[in-house]
Amino acid sequence: MAVTIRDVARASGVHISTVSRTFSAPHLVNPETRSRVLATAEQLGYRPNRAARALITGRTHNIGLIVADIANPFFPPLIKAAETHARRRDYHVFVADTDEDPIVEADLVQALAKQVDGILLCSPRMSDDQIEQLRREVPLVVINRMITGLPAVVMDVGQGARSAVRHLLDLGHRHLVYLSGPRGSWTNQKIRQAAGATARAAGAELTVLGPHQPVSAAGAAAAEAVLATGATAVLAYNDLMAIGLLQALQDRDIAVPGQVSVVGIDDIAASELVRPQLTTVANPTAAAGRAAVDMLLQQGDDGSTGQINLHTDLVIRNSTGPGPFLPAGATTAEVAAYVKE
Amino acid sequence: MAVTIRDVARASGVHISTVSRTFSAPHLVNPETRSRVLATAEQLGYRPNRAARALITGRTHNIGLIVADIANPFFPPLIKAAETHARRRDYHVFVADTDEDPIVEADLVQALAKQVDGILLCSPRMSDDQIEQLRREVPLVVINRMITGLPAVVMDVGQGARSAVRHLLDLGHRHLVYLSGPRGSWTNQKIRQAAGATARAAGAELTVLGPHQPVSAAGAAAAEAVLATGATAVLAYNDLMAIGLLQALQDRDIAVPGQVSVVGIDDIAASELVRPQLTTVANPTAAAGRAAVDMLLQQGDDGSTGQINLHTDLVIRNSTGPGPFLPAGATTAEVAAYVKE
DNA sequence: TAATCTGTTGCAAACGTTTGCTGTTGATGG
DNA sequence: CCATCAACAGCAAACGTTTGCAACAGATTA
């Protein structure tokens, strides 16, 4: 049925090994022979069978990409960049979705292990131990989580959170809220620590609310709680939550940024589409995807296990501004009254 | 290095074919033997090598999913649903992005062909001929495009467009604009035809603007042109464009839906996050993904080549309402003046 | 001139499975 | 008691490649 190396060999009067070499080690075959083989291959429509190749070389030229939730707008740009980059290097990529379930995550790695040359693990929810375990079965690069001894590429959310908080501080805010993300998220911890430290260092207060699911509904649901704190500025775990909050506040006739400033993290596409446009920390997700692919592909060569820390950028838009500043220690009722004006 | 069927055979004192059958045809092996083999396999950490299996059976248990742009929010829910559904049937999926380029599209199908049992082609930009050509190399299911003789699952955008236009008509609008999508999009044609026919049947006018790239910037850029037509309602090729337009209008102090009503198509997540929330036609993308996978997997069995037409739903939110109605034949200047009030 | 080398090709053994066929055993039926 | 059969297990040939080794020619070196 399908045309194989053998058909090409017969048609061009050489041995199959010569045909094989024409494709996998061209420099070993006479230019003349080579072009003849190439021509008949082209004419016959020959395409190498990757399964057979994989069987003998042990390299599949496939990589796996495991993310928590494909539909979370944070991931698609990363997936896209990784896929495009991989393809340019003649690799194909399996994409899989864990639905934020650590068990599914582990199963997936196992299932994919034999079929890929390595796996990119995005924001894994597994324990460090589990991940180290799996690393013994298949080359791994972890994205958005740092585990000593494991190759990783992370986006420096700590630095991003610091910039965001400093921006808010510069605008005069003294009481901030951090709307935290899901339990078990490494990123969440980093943000929380960095934001807390930066606020404290400036003598400002930071109230942590959460944990929350990283979705807009959770941000919206947190609106009351945010107002109750009396804070004038909010940093959210991600843009989705920030946008949810943004709209919930506006639905309550609370001006953003007039009365409350809101900052997100990720810079998803929607952040620009929403009004006011969201001030946020832009994560270089595309760069991260590419870097992770490179790291994975190099890993085979040397045994290097580098860790890359990608710079993040605060992008200031219209959801932040100098706020209304309450007397310290205002009660919830006072805040609400103030805010209603 | 890796543990193979041979290791398991040796360790459990049977022939390799028995081990093979334990996994691929359990009913052919004695329950006692089977459990013994299973136990040692488990203990040794044996995992079947899919490449070897694929080589001999010709079935890879992989499928390919090719989309125009992973980052376009329309696709991720479809990808997610397809992947999850496929995995439940023990298939893994390659995801690839064509960047809206028909050439890349064809290359990708070819490259993936030998490595998958079939390919899901989403909103292809290739010509019908090309697609039929490729179908001879690999089983195909086309999503969001109807080609006679080819298995397809489409979302009934025609019906969606009709509902949308009827909704606008019911609100009293007499002059509508259709903001059309990219050239070569089958969906675009369908919408345009359905919208035009519905408007004409009611004696209303429909002006077509475009083509445009299916992105929010294009929607925003079209704002002036839309106003110039004097229309009071707009149907856009997709939500992204609708949202772009929405914000561009508001930035010009034009009330939505007070002065102009806007309807999108797709019901992407952002449509609910934007204010006013966007009235739009919800496409059952997840269902489409699942249906396409099923269709592809069945295709091997019988030679069936069904076509599924999925129902779409108009979801009415806050971007549509009774508009201000101008005297017929108002000039651009008059419209602008009117609209500024 | 003999020895060595270089460039090119063929040969055949892998890689880890699946599967049609053949044997063996013990049970069933006449 | 022989013939038939069913259930099970082993044998070996595939599947389409890659790759170490050997063979050979012609060129280079000593």
Image (spheres, coloured by chain):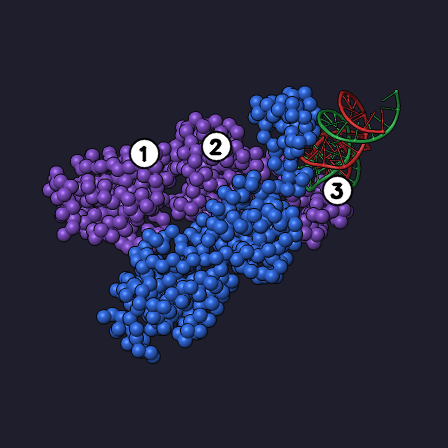
Chain colours: A purple, B blue, C red, D green
**Which of disc 3 and disc 1 is earlier in sequence?**
3
Q: Chain of mark 1?
A: A
Residue B194 image position (x, y, % from top left): 47, 67
Q: Is residue B278 above or below residue B297?
A: below
Instruction: State yes or no: discs 3 and 2 in contact (Cβ < 8 Å).
Output: no
Q: Which residue is mark 2?
A: A106
**Which of disc 2 and disc 1 is earlier in sequence?**
2
Q: Which residue is mark 1?
A: A189
Q: For label 2, count other residues whose C-alpha is less than 10 Å away and answer few (under 14), some (14-19) or many (20+).
A: some
A10 or A206: which is nearer to us?
A206
| Extreme residue in the left direction | A327
Instruction: Name which residue type carries label 3.
Output: His
D29 or B171: which is nearer to us?
B171
Distance between the alpha carbons at the discs numbered 1 and 2: 22 Å
Q: For label 3, count other residues whose C-alpha is less than 10 Å away and answer few (under 14), some (14-19) or many (20+).
A: few
Quick check: can you spot residue B319?
A: yes
Which of discs 1 and 2 lies nearer the camera? The answer is: 2
Which of discs 1 and 3 lies nearer the camera? The answer is: 1
Q: Chain of mark 3?
A: A
Q: Which residue is mark 3?
A: A15
Q: Residue at x 59, y 55 (%)?
A: B306
Q: At numbered mark 3, what does the secondary structure look like: helix, strand or loop? A: loop
Q: Residue at x 37, y 39 (%)?
A: A155
Q: Chain of mark 2?
A: A
Q: Residue at x 62, y 55 (%)?
A: B305
B67 or C12: which is nearer to us?
B67
Is circle 1 on the same chain as circle 2? yes
Q: At numbered mark 2, what does the secondary structure look like: helix, strand or loop? A: helix
